[in-house]
C-alpha cells in the first residue's frame, strides 16, 4: 500500500486532462460565432440535450463534498447519510413535475429574475447578494479546499497550494467557454466520475475481504461490512437517552433520526434542486420535455451515488476498527483518500481523475452561475443597464476570475475553518441558514397567488434570523432542555458550562414552519390575488407515459432500498 502516485497514475491523469480540455475547446469553437451572445454564453443557447442536462446536473452536484465529505460521514454515521442522495432523487422528481414547468412557462432564466417577476426588485436584489456570498464563501471555498486536501494526500502531502491553484485554473479553462462548454464537458466528467468511483468501491470491498481472509471477493467484502459494522447499516439514527455516549449524541446531532425526515432534509433537497441557480440553470434554456427528461435522468443517477461515495467510507471504518488501516489523516474526511491508497498503479490515477472530475465540474458550474447572477441580475440592472451582449459576456468572465480568486484566497490557509467542521456538514449547515426562508419564498410564490412582495422580503430575512437563533442561541436563551427536548450536549465546555446544540436539520424545520406562518399572516393583509402571481396551467403538469414509467421505477428502487436498510 503506497500513498504516492506512480508514473502510470500521472499518465492516466494527464490523458484525462487532455481529453476534457480538447473536447471543451472543440465545443467552444463550434459555438465561437455566438461567442458574444449573452444567452449563448449563460444558457447554452437552449440547445442542451436531456442526457447532457442530466449528466451536467450530477457532475456539478457530485464534488469533493460528496467524495470526501459524504465518504467521511459514511465512516462516522454509516448508510444513514445515503438519505441525502436517495431523497434527492425524489426531490428531483418533484422539481421535474411541478417546479420546472413554472419556470419555463414564465421564461425564467435566473432565480433573482423569478423573484423580480413574482415579487419585486428589492427581493431579487437581496437574494442575488445572498446567493453570491453563499456560492463564493460556502460552496466554492469548501469544494476547492476539500478537493485540494484530498489530492494533496495522494500526491505526497507537499503540494496543497499548487494543487489548489491547479484545480482553480482547470475549472477556469472550462468555465470561460460558457454554459455549453461546461455542460458538454460534464458528460465526460460524469463518466469518469462514475467509472472511477465504482472502481474505488470495488477495490475497497476486496480489501476488506482480503483483510479477513476471504480473498478478492467484493461481495464477501460487502457482507463483512454489514457483519462487522451493523450499526452503520441503519437508515435511522436512534434518539439518544440518558445513558447514551457522547459519540451516539454526536451522530444524532449530525442526522437526528426520524426528525431529519420530518424537518430539514426535505428543505435541503427541494431548495437545492428546485430554487438554486447553480442547478436549475442547466434546464432553464431547454424545452419542457427535454428539461424534465434531463432532471429525471439525474434523479436516476443519484441512486448510484451512495455506492460510489459512501461505501468506501464504511469500508475505511471497518478496516480502521480492525487494524487494517493504521492511520486516518484528517479525521473522518480522510476516509476516502485512505481507501485510494489501496488501489494498484494506474487505477489510482483513474480514481484521482474521477475525484478531479467531480471537483472541477462543480467549480466550473458554480463560477458559471456566479457570473450569470452577477452579470444579469446585478451589473446589467444596477451598474450598466445598456450593456451590449459582448460586454455582458466579458463582465461574466471577469466575475468568473474574481470569484475563483476569492475562493483561492479564503481557502489558502483554511481561514473559514472548513477542515475543523467536516466538509459535508459545513456545507449543509451553513447553506441551511438561508434555505428555510428561500424555499418558503419560492414555494408560496409558485403555488399561492396571495403571497405578497412584503411577505417575501420579511420571509427571507426572518428565515435567516430564525436559523441563526435556533442554530446558535436557542439552547442558551430558552434552556438546554426546551423546544421539544431537541437540544443535546456537544461535549464542549465554555467557562465551565456545557454547550448544548440543536441538530441543524431540526433548526431548519423550525425556521421553515415559523417563516411560512409569518409569510402567510402578512399575505392575508394584502389582496386575495397578487397582481404579479403566476398563472398556472394544469396542462403543463401533465406527464407523458414514458416519463411516468421512469418516475415509478425510480420510486420503487428507493422503496426497496429503504425496506432493506430501515
Image: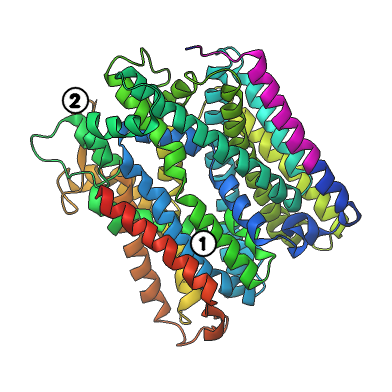
- Left or right, residue 91 beside residue 490: right
Q: CA distance from mark 1 to mark 2?
A: 44 Å
What is the image's colouring?
rainbow
Look at the numbered disc 2 and give the secondary structure of its residue: loop
Image position, residue 438 (x, y; %): 47, 60
Image position, residue 32 (x, y; %): 89, 51
The 10 Å Cα crowd at callout 1, few under 14, some 14 to 19, many 20 or more, is: many
The front one of 71 and 483 is 71
Image position, residue 429 (x, y; %): 40, 44
The magenta-colored residue range is 2-23
Task: Tell me what residue is drawn at x 46 percent, y 41 percent.
Answer: 427
Residue 7 within the segment the image draws in magenta: yes
Q: Which residue is mark 2?
A: 496
Q: Which residue is mark 1?
A: 274
In this view, which residue lies farthest toward the bottom? 528
- Left or right, residue 462 beside residue 172: left
Q: Quadrant of residue 39?
A: bottom right
Task: Tell me what residue is drawn at x 52 percent, y 79 percent.
Answer: 541
Image position, residue 97 (x, y; %): 50, 71
The 10 Å Cα crowd at callout 2, few under 14, some 14 to 19, many 20 or more, is: few
Look at the numbered disc 1 and give the secondary structure of its residue: helix
Amino acid at each position: 500500500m503506497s500513498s504516492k502516485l506512480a508514473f502510470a497514475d500521472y499518465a492516466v491523469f494527464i490523458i484525462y486532462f487532455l481529453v476534457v480540455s480538447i473536447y471543451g475547446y472543440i465545443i467552444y469553437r463550434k459555438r465561437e460565432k455566438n461567442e458574444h451572445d449573452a444567452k449563448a454564453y449563460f444558457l447554452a443557447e437552449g440547445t442542451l440535450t436531456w442526457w447532457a442536462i442530466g449528466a451536467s446536473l450530477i457532475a456539478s452536484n457530485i464534488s469533493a463534498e460528496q467524495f470526501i465529505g459524504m465518504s467521511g460521514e459514511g465512516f462516522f454515521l454509516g448508510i444513514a447519510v445515503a438519505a441525502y442522495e436517495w431523497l434527492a432523487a425524489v426531490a428531483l422528481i418533484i422539481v421535474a413535475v411541478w417546479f420546472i414547468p413554472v419556470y419555463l412557462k414564465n421564461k425564467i432564466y435566473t432565480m433573482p429574475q423569478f423573484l423580480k417577476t413574482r415579487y419585486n426588485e428589492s427581493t431579487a436584489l437581496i437574494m442575488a447578494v445572498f446567493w453570491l456570498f453563499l456560492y463564493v464563501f460556502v460552496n466554492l471555498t469548501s469544494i476547492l479546499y476539500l478537493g485540494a486536501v484530498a489530492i494533496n494526500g495522494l500526491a505526497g502531502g507537499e503540494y496543497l497550494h499548487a494543487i489548489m491553484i491547479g484545480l482553480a485554473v482547470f475549472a477556469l479553462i472550462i468555465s470561460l467557454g460558457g454554459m455549453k462548454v461546461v455542460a458538454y464537458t460534464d458528460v465526460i466528467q460524469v463518466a469518469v466520475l462514475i467509472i472511477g468511483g465504482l472502481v474505488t468501491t470495488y477495490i475497497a470491498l476486496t480489501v476488506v475481504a482480503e483483510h479477513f481472509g476471504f480473498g478478492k471477493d467484493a461481495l464477501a467484502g460487502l457482507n463483512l461490512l454489514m457483519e462487522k459494522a451493523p450499526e452503520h447499516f441503519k437508515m435511522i439514527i436512534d434518539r439518544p437517552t440518558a445513558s447514551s455516549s457522547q459519540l451516539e449524541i454526536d451522530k444524532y446531532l449530525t442526522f437526528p433520526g426520524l426528525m431529519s425526515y420530518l424537518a430539514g432534509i426535505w428543505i435541503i433537497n427541494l431548495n437545492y434542486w428546485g430554487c438554486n441557480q447553480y442547478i436549475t440553470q442547466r434546464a432553464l434554456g431547454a424545452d419542457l420535455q427535454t428539461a424534465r427528461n434531463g432532471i429525471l435522468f439525474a434523479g436516476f443517477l443519484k441512486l448510484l451515488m451512495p455506492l460510489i461515495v459512501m461505501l468506501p467510507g464504511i469500508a475505511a471504518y471497518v478496516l480502521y476498527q480492525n487494524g487494517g488501516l493504521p492511520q486516518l489523516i484528517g479525521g473522518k474526511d480522510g476516509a476516502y483518500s485512505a481507501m485510494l491508497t489501496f488501489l494498484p498503479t494506474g487505477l489510482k490515477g483513474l480514481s484521482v481523475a474521477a475525484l478531479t472530475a467531480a471537483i472541477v465540474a462543480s467549480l466550473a458550474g458554480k463560477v458559471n452561475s456566479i457570473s450569470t447572477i452577477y452579470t444579469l441580475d446585478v451589473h446589467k440592472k444596477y451598474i450598466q443597464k445598456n450593456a451590449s451582449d459582448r460586454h455582458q459576456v466579458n463582465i461574466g468572465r471577469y466575475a468568473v476570475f474574481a470569484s475563483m480568486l476569492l475562493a483561492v484566497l479564503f481557502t489558502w490557509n483554511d481561514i473559514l475553518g472548513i477542515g475543523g467542521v467536516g466538509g459535508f456538514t459545513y456545507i449543509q449547515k451553513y447553506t441551511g441558514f438561508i434555505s428555510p426562508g428561500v424555499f418558503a419564498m419560492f414555494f408560496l410564490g409558485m403555488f399561492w397567488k396571495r403571497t405578497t412582495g412584503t411577505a417575501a422580503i420579511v420571509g427571507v430575512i426572518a428565515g435567516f434570523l430564525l436559523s441563526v437563533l435556533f442554530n446558535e442561541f436557542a439552547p442558551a436563551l430558552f434552556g438546554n432542555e426546551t423546544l421539544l427536548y431537541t437540544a443535546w450536549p456537544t461535549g464542549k465546555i465554555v467557562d465551565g458550562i456545557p454547550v448544548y446544540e440543536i441538530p441543524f436539520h431540526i433548526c431548519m424545520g423550525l425556521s421553515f414552519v415559523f417563516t411560512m406562518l409569518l409569510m402567510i399572516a402578512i399575505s392575508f393583509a394584502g389582496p386575495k390575488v397578487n397582481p404579479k402571481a403566476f398563472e398556472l396551467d394544469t396542462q403543463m403538469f401533465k406527464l407523458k407515459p414514458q416519463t411516468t414509467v421512469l418516475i415509478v421505477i425510480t420510486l420503487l428502487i428507493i422503496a426497496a432500498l429503504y425496506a432493506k436498510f430501515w
